[in-house]
């Protein structure tokens, strides 16, 4: 559930059968709220100072005609693309749990957005986890491409 466009190139040796056709597009049904953790550490919540800054900055961008906006969601939407510094830009995915109680996604939630299992996340720094999730590709996309690619080559 991410709106980043990707380009996938498939290379097949000349001596192998080549009837590859990309899988059909699968409609996105998951929303951010389907992937959220239940109990989130307070370190992921934005301070009032940051929220006020993002709101003012967003209003200034609107006046200038710039596209970057602070738009926290209740999670009932398809996620924006995950960045390598998730939760550090005002136009990242932010969850609004109540009035002025807004948080960024946790590293685990970012990996869930990419289709990784919960046990994939390893004990490294959060900044490294955000970079890994932001630089990753969606696991279900690769799984579907590989199924089509390998269907005629597995005996």
Image: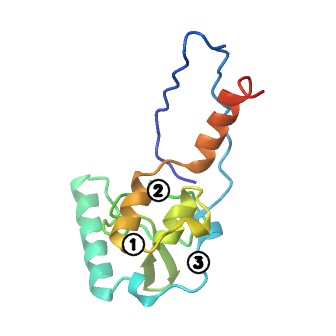
Disc 2 element: loop
Q: Which mark is residue 37?
A: 3
Comparing labels 2 and 1, the label whose residue is closer to the camera: 1
Q: Are marks 1 and 3 in contact (CB under 8 Å)?
A: no
135 is higher (above) or lower (below) than 47: above
Q: Residue furthest top?
A: 15
Q: Is residue 129 above or below residue 14?
A: below
Locate the N terminus and report the quarter of the image it occupies: bottom right
Find residue 66 and report its horizontal and vertical position in percent: 26, 53
Name the foreground residue: 29 vs 84: 84
User: What residue do we see at 59% from left, 56% from top?
Assistant: 115
Residue 80's mark? Answer: 2
The residue carrying mark 1 is 124
User: Who's the residue at 39% across and 86% down the image?
Assistant: 43
User: In the picture, which quadrant includes the C terminus?
Assistant: top right
Q: Position of residue 106 (x, y in %)?
A: 47, 74
Judged from this view, the residue extending furthest toward the right is 155
| Side of 54 where 26 appears, left or right | right
Q: Give percent across and percent down for residue 139.
A: 58, 49
Distance of mark 2 from mark 1, alpha carbons?
Answer: 24 Å
Which secondary structure, mark 1? loop
- Earlier sequence position, callout 2 versus callout 1: 2
Label 3 sits on a secondary structure element that is: loop
On residue 145, the disc is none
Query: Which one is earlier in the sequence, the residue at label 1 or at label 3?
Result: 3
Q: Quick one: label 2, few (<14), some, or many (20+) residues within 10 Å?
A: some
The answer to which image quadrant residue 35 occupies is: bottom right
């Amino acid at each position: 559930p991410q709106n980043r466009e990707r380009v996938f190139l498939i290379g097949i040796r000349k001596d192998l059968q080549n009837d590859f056709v990309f899988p059909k597009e699968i409609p996105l049904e998951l929303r951010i709220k389907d992937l959220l953790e239940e109990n989130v550490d307070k370190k992921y919540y934005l301070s009032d100072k940051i929220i006020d800054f993002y709101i003012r900055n967003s209003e200034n961008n609107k006046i200038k005609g710039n596209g970057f906006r602070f738009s926290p969601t209740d999670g009932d939407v398809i996620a924006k693309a995950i960045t390598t510094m998730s939760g550090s830009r005002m136009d990242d995915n932010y969850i609004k749990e109540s009035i002025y109680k807004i948080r960024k996604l946790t590293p685990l939630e970012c990996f869930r957005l990419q289709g990784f299992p919960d046990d994939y996340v390893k004990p490294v720094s959060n900044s490294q986890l955000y970079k890994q999730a932001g630089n990753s590709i969606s696991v279900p996309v690769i799984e579907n491409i590989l199924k089509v690619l390998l269907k005629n080559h597995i005996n």
